[in-house]
Amino acid sequence: MAPLLEVRDLRVEFPTRRGILTALDGVSFSIAPGEVLGVVGESGAGKSMTGAAIIGLLEPPGRIAGGQILLNGKRIDNLRYDQMRRIRGREIGAIFQDPLTTLNPLYTVGEQLVETIRTHLGLDGAEARKRAIGWLEMVGIPAAAQRVDSYPHEFSGGMRQRVVIALALCAEPKLIVADEPTTALDVSIQAQVIALLKGLARDKGTSMMLVTHDMGVIAETADRVAVMYAGRIAEIGPVREVVKHPKHPYSAGLMASIPPLDRKVEHLAQIDGAMPRLSAIPRGCAFNPRCPEVFARCLVERPALLATGATEAACWLYDAASEKHAPEAMRHG
Amino acid sequence: MLAFIISRILQALPVMAVVALISFAMFAYVGDPVAIMLGQDFTEQQRQALVASLGLDQPFFVQFGKFIWNALHGEFGLSYRLSRPVAELIEERAPATLELAFCAALVSLCIGVPMGVYTGLYRNSWLSRFFLTFSLIGVSLPTFLIGILLILVFSVWLGWLPSFGRGDTVQLGWWSTGLLTVSGLKALVLPSVTLGMFQLTLIMRLVRAEMLEVLRTDYIKFARARGLANRAINFGHALKNTLVPVITVAGLQLGGIIAFAIVTETVFQWPGMGLLFIQSVNSADIPVMAAYLMLIALVFVTINLVVDLLYYAVDPRLRVGGAKRGH
Amino acid sequence: MAAIARMIDSDLFWSFRRSPVTVISAVVALICVLGAVLAPLLAPHNPFDVATLNLIDAFKPPAWAAEGDAAYPLGSDDQGRDVLSAIMYGARVSLLVGFCAVLFSMVVGVSVGLLAGYAGGAVDGLLMRIADIQLTFPNILIALLVDGIARAALPSDVHDRVALFVVIFAIGISAWPQFARTVRGSTLVERNKEYVLAARVIGISQLRIMLTHVLPNVLGPVLVIATLGLSNAIISEATLSYLGAGVPQTQPSLGTLIRIGNDFLFSGEWWIAIFPGIALIAMVLSVNLLGDWLRDALNPRLR
């Protein structure tokens, strides 16, 4: 099937007075219709930045400096603001992290829904209001017909995130970019919201890019997963494969640091060191200072994504031309 | 709603009480009103009669109580300088000041808010830079200097507008208005612009700062992510949120206009309360100063109350929990 | 010391050099200060030396006008005083009053703020309530009231002698709440930080904690308020003097000069009022621009 979204060699830069920072470098992936792609990584790895670039809302002075973003085969990274505006909401919906700050406090949730619906679907007021109530019911707001006239501050955090989901979906986009949609919520509510999101996406056939640092959420929701590190994709592949048999040493470290539920462990594995700052990304592979498998080639040459089994990993371990270590050597933790 | 208003009024009472106390202290203890009122020649009987008639021989709280009681009835005694009831003087001059303040407020709001919105939205355009430079000059120019420059250009050099007085006024009951005659309106132009200039630049910079702040918020980003039209985002979402803090500060600033009128009225010899006050300061006419202070305090307290009510109307977060503040 | 080191951080200098407006403002401010401080050395005339005044030289227009006189570059006033020299001497008074008034309100405001933030409770409530009430009224009104009360309370000969101090006090007392509020806010934040608690646990006195830990942290904002406060104080002084309630006539400030010149506006001798006005604008504008720059530079979020 032709991909719904395709990102090719995306490069995002921030000009600063100390020089240009490259926040995303050579990021490529695609999302098929109806597919959920999870994106994981540490804070600052470029997960949210990728989402912002796709919806065309990078914070200035950030800018797309190279590569392409295609939606249904058409480029959307070079559209004028007003053309892109028609795509936002209508073709690509977005969900942000903090439901407490994403809703305008001065308008009722109904007003905000009706505004979005009317902007994109050209319905009259009464019809749009009916839809708005329908969407509130769909995201599980009790007594939606009354709550539609409530202000955001009258809802709890979890309920507000449901409203945000309704707002993101109400113009029936093909793709949802969900940026840490549950991070700001109580743990007890996170599962409900994820289940709701997953269910709605499946029912509507909506694709989703789910940015999170919670591997549990990814394992449960995503079809495929991309692991990001220092503005690059380290590994991408089917979620079971990446979780069970990570190929990239960074993914391996990341997976090993998840506490297993079925047995007790003395201490969790951890990756030594910290992700480099954008101004100090090392030559070659960005992970080389922390990598337990590092060898000469990693220090000079940057690896591209290499197919290995069911996944692709940006690691020289999987290149035939490298003087390999035994791949088994990295199965620690 | 009613509880909200009452709680606000209760908060205002201590302010009025403190101001009344200061006014009274000025009235009773600064200088020697008896000596000032008697002049050069007097007998001891005359002096004591005056002390008794002013109630100066009574205990502090009795005097203060009487002062408050009289103030509530609009009685502030006689002006030392003009030997006329202070209330009468103020009543005569209030319309001039209020009309001037009203026009100045209109000037500053009607020009300041749109300029602030524009500079907030298009922060890098050359017009925004021009407005910002202009506002900086506006903040840096003392009010009286603006007045003098305007007089120099429009009265002395061009001869278009009068440089002093109110022009012809029309009497509507006790209120004398300059709004109904051509010369009255012409006379209003320069003083209103002078008086409104500082507030204009202040409101503009405030609106701009708030606009920039609001445009950075998540809900504006989310509104963009929902693909709303720019106009809806800028004016529906951003401006409305900007208004909440702007109302508060702008309200207080407009209150300041009445006080700042002192300077403008002096420059343009505008026959209002401010000119009366400055003449009183220069001749140590305490009763007028005390009365003016109380009056200004009352104006400020009233404006505060109106601002709170407006706040209440704009921000739904205030409506639910009664007088609870949001944020 | 740490705060001073932090302020002479490269970021601050970088943003200073990068902003030509700021550099120009600094130069203009420096010229104003030097011209004022060194007036007795630099001024072409001594405007207060009655012996050198000659009424024949009165109302000379600026040097570049047809009837101008090179001896009076910016013209002369009704007494035959050189306007340029009067401006330089006047700026001295304006700057002196401005600096002293800001210093006064800074000392009062910072002390009150530290005390309120550190003591908390009823003391804090009372002090901040007073600040709130005072903030309700415009500075100029407070200053006028103080001046008016002093005038009424003091015999006129005493008043003339202390008029300068009365003005400094009147302007200074009208501006302390801004300092107090800022310092109190920062103090509250600092007070609850762990290192302050730790310092208290090991028995360091409260006063010492305030001075060594809290004060350096509020220095930046205080400096910004002081800079912007200086231009406000200069404006307030000029306004008071213009209204006839400020410095005594024997020590004319820029505001006094403008007041005097105002009378001659209609008879065509505009330069007597306008040149002191321009000097005042240059001074206030340059200080304001420096203050604006300082605020933005110390608060990167606003950039």
Image: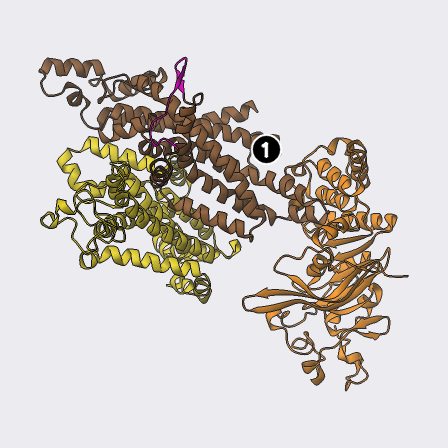
Question: Is residue A221 at all visible to an observer of this figure?
Answer: yes
Q: Is residue B121 positioned above or below B24 on the image?
A: below
Nearer to the camera, C288 or A224: C288
Label 1: which residue?
A: B314
Q: Position of residue C76 (x, y in %)?
A: 21, 47
On the rendered image, what quadrant is the C terminus of chain A found in? bottom right
On the rendered image, what quadrant is the N terminus of chain A found in? bottom right
Q: Is residue A110 magenta?
A: no
| Residue type beneath disc 1 | Val
Residue drawn at point x = 46 percent, y = 42 percent = B201
Q: Which chain is yellow?
A: C
The image quarter containing residue A292 is bottom right
Q: Is residue B310 left or right of residue A44?
A: left
Nearer to the camera, A66 or C266: C266
Q: Is residue C223 left or right of residue A272?
A: left
Q: Which chain is orange?
A: A
Give the residue furthest to the right: A1
| Range of residues picked out in magenta | B161-177
* Chain containing mark 1: B
Q: Callout 1: 10 Å neighbours few (<14), some, many (20+)? A: some
- SS at badge 1: helix
Q: Which chain is brown?
A: B
Q: Position of residue A209 (x, y in %)?
A: 78, 57
Residue drawn at point x = 60 percent, y = 40 percent = B239
